[in-house]
Structures are given as C-alpha cells and as structure tokens.
Image: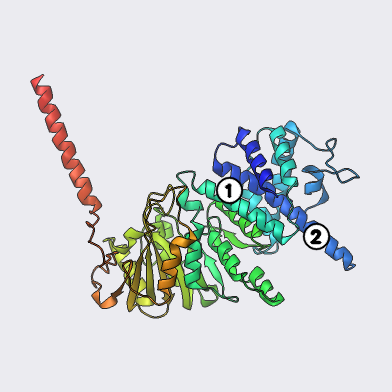
Amino acid sequence: MFEQTFKRLDDVLWKEAGCTTELDYTEQSSWMLFLKYLDDLERDRAMEAELLGKPYSFLIDEAHRWGTWAAPKNADGEFDHDKAVTGDDLIAYVDNDLFPYLAGFKQRAESADTIEYKIGEIFGEIKNRFRSGYSLRDALELVDELKFRSQAEKHEMSMLYEEKIKRMGNAGRNGGEYYTPRSLIRAMIKVIDPKIGERIYDGAAGSAGFLCEAHDYLRKDDLSANQLETLQRRTFYGKEKKSLAYVIAIMNMILHGIDAPNITHTNTLADVNITDIQDKDRYDVILANPPFGGKERKEVQQNFPIKTGETAFLFLQHFIKSLKAGGRAAIVIKNTFLSNSDNAAKAIRKELLESCDLHTVLDCPGGTFQGAGVKTVVLFFTKGTATQNIWFYQLDPGRSLGKTTALTDADFEDFVKLQATKAESEKSWTLNISDVDKASFDLSVKNPSKAEEAPLRDPEEILAEIAALDAESAEILNGIRGML
C-alpha cells in the first residue's frame, strides 16, 4: 500500500541538491516520518480522551503541528494549497522556527525516557538538508499520505523502512555500522531466547536492529495487557553515540511498535567508569554489534580496567560488566579478537573465560557484512560461571556472499539446530578449556574436520617484509640510474 509512496519520496530526495547519499535520504525521510507519526499519535490520543470525556493536552502547539505547516487541510479534509507555505519561506520556517522549537523540548522534558525528551534530542542533532522549498513541499505531501493509525500500517512501513536502512548500510563505507544482517540477528536471538520480563540491552544500538528483532521475537505469542505494557516500557534499552544512527534507531523502534523507545543519545564508553556499574544498572540479555576498528581517546580508556584504544574491546568489557549474574549475551566481534597477541586482547579473553561461560562461538563467513571487509565471529556467553567447554560452529553457506547473495534465515538453520545440543559435525566441534594455552588464551577457529589453513601473519612481520622489499627496489633503481 505504501511502497509506491516510499519510492516517490526517494525520487524527490534523489533530485534534491542537499541530499547526496543514502544516509541523507534516510535521515531526511526519518525526521518527516517522525513528525507525521507524532501527529497521528496525538490525534488518536485526543480522540480517545474525547470519547472518555477527558481533556487532552497536545505536546506540539498548534502553530507547529503537522496539520498547520506540513499538510494544511480545507473544510472537506483535502490538502489546502492556498495555505501551504512553500519555496524559500518553507525552508526559512523549518530552519529558523520549527527545528529550534522542537529542539527546545529536551530542556522542557521531565525525564530522558519521555517522548518529549526524544523530540528534543532528535531535532537538536539533525539538520534539514533540503535547499529547495519546492522539493520539501513535494516530500511533505508524500509523507502525509502515510498513515500510522493501525498496527498493520505500522508493520508495512517498518518493512519498507528496514529496506531503506539496508540500502544505506550496503552503500559502502558504513556497511557494518548501520546495518547488521537481520538473518544473523534472528539466529542470535533464537539461541539467546529472551523472555517477557527480561531487560534487553544494546550499548551500540546503531539502527536498533537487535532491539527491533527482539521485539518481534517476543511478540510472536499472544500477550496479556500487562505483558504488552512490560514490552513497551520496561524491556528494551539502548545507547547510541552518532546523531544519524540515533534518529534512525528511534524511528525504527517506533515503526516496530515501541511508542517511546528507551534509546539514549550518548557515548556509551565515556558514560561511566565500569567499576561503578551497580546491579540495578545491569541487564538480563545483551545483543550487540559494536563498531569495527574504532579508536577511543585516553580519557575514555580510563573508564576500563583493561586499557586499550580498540573500541570493540572496550565494549566487550562494558557488556561483561553490564550483565546480571546468569545474564546471557551474544556479541559480534572481529575474528582477530580470538587470537590477537597484544596484552589487552589476552587480558580480555582471560576475563571473559573466567567470569563467564563462553559456551558458543559462531564463525561467520567473509562477506557477512557488505562493504565492511572484515571477518567476524559471534560470542555467546552466560555470566557467572567459568568456561569449561566452547562449542564452535563454522558457517559455510556454500556460496560467495554479496548484495544479491546475502545470508538468509535458511543459512542459519543448521547452526541453531545443532547449537541446542552442542552436537559435533563437519562444521562444529568442541574445545575443552584445559586445551587452551593459559599464557595466550588463544581461541583461534581451527576446525578439526578441515585441513588447517595457514595462520594469519603478524602485522609487524608483514610491514617488515614490505620495508625490505621497498629497500630492495630502491637499491635496484639506484643501480639502474648509475648505469644510465
């Protein structure tokens, strides 16, 4: 029903000079969708209050309401072109009046878990990238065609929005940052098997794919009114550092049925010294894909007992500390974590093995993350008891992975089935902790059913060889010059 509208909206954004990438398209779609959603939500609440004979106080004042500036209607309920501001006047209104008004909600909100705070946070961070008020007017009229009144409408839009996020994630350099393949997320959730009443957390939320998929997993059964309330208010928690990802995460969760998502816009790693995390701050389930290859400043590293500039290693420490006793986690991380020889990596592996039961390692094939160019594993662990045995599974879909041959749910069926009993096969095996070297804590993936691959060379060895070859080439060139 809404697919054509989404396509026409993309066409408008593609022609707009201020929008040049898939990231821009998604960002600009998001703030308009959010305001349209908010308007539908407020009108539904007002009608409900009227039926009950109760007053309703709108969050957005009339001057800034969607129906006043974005989609004014005449007495017949049809779009009123005479009242609709356009051109330079529309751009000036959005930039100088609307966005500052909405950004002010952050200061006026009672707490960070309110929809008011989310409004202020979103519009205090993003910018209107439209430069043509005529293009913006076209986009607003298209967004006004979308409806958020029923669960079916929200579901359809959530599917279209997920496709938009997927295209953005596959656009290149930001592949793994904004989009974790949903088939991988669903497999991770099946293994973790979250329950209603458990608190689920992602401290590197990105587009909130883990939280949205966990929500859908928990909604597969009929739920009571109390369970639905728990799902809405006390189940999903996330943190996200980047402004665009934060906006997308909020919109994505709203479309998946969470009215006021508990997503905080913050640098998770700079938030608090992890030794100060209290039991009330801990979670039952953690699902995450922390950023690949990021580097953190010295002052951020001071929040962690094991100092390292590697963002993913700091996140792993944060996640271990943030789990409740008996809590379960599934974390995506570069496969080099299992064998890195630096002191920080060895210390974190030791901490993980001694404080948690690292019961499963899923070895993902190259190409799992489009555009990211790294190989990854998923660590599944339970906090509170030391590791005794680690079950490895080497995922092999039998094809090269690309944009048109990405991983599917079917590719994970064998993994999920065998993981339940930790059965051994040509793709799976068990490593006893007594066989792990206690000096290096090396957990390299070594499938005993396959011929051992040549080990990865040390980066310093490769650099030394490059330097030697450069020196040799220079010597040869100098000799040639001497003969000329």
- Position of 250 with respect to 300 (left or right) is right
Q: Position of residue 480 (x, y in %)?
A: 11, 25
- Position of 299 with respect to 30 (left or right) is left
Q: Which of marks 2 and 1 is nearer the N terminus?
A: 2
Point 79% across, 43% down: residue: 69
Amino acid type for the residue under numbered disc 2: Asp
Q: Position of residue 256 (x, y in %)?
A: 64, 60
Label 1 crowd bin: few (<14), some (14–19), many (20+), radius 10 Å: some
Q: Position of residue 2 (x, y in %)?
A: 69, 48
Mark number, residue 43? none
Amino acid type for the residue under numbered disc 1: Lys
Q: Where is residue 74 in the image (x, y as percent from the top left)?
A: 88, 43
Query: Which residue is more in the foreground, 138 or 339?
Result: 138
Q: Which of marks 2 and 1 is in front?
A: 1
Query: Which residue is more in the foreground, 53 or 376?
Result: 376
Mark number, residue 44? 2
- Position of 149 with respect to 214 (left or right) is right
Q: Which residue does the numbered mark 1 point to in the structure image?
A: 164
Q: How far is disc 2 from disc 1 in space, using C-alphas?
A: 27 Å
Question: With respect to residue 441, does 269 lie above or below?
Answer: above
Query: Which residue is more in the foreground, 203 or 200?
Result: 200
Name the element at disc 2. helix
- Color theme of the render: rainbow
Q: In which quarter of the image is the C terminus?
A: top left
Label 2 crowd bin: few (<14), some (14–19), many (20+), radius 10 Å: some
Residue at the extreme top:
484
- Position of 325 with respect to 79 (left or right) is left
Query: Which residue is more in the foreground, 302 or 128?
Result: 128
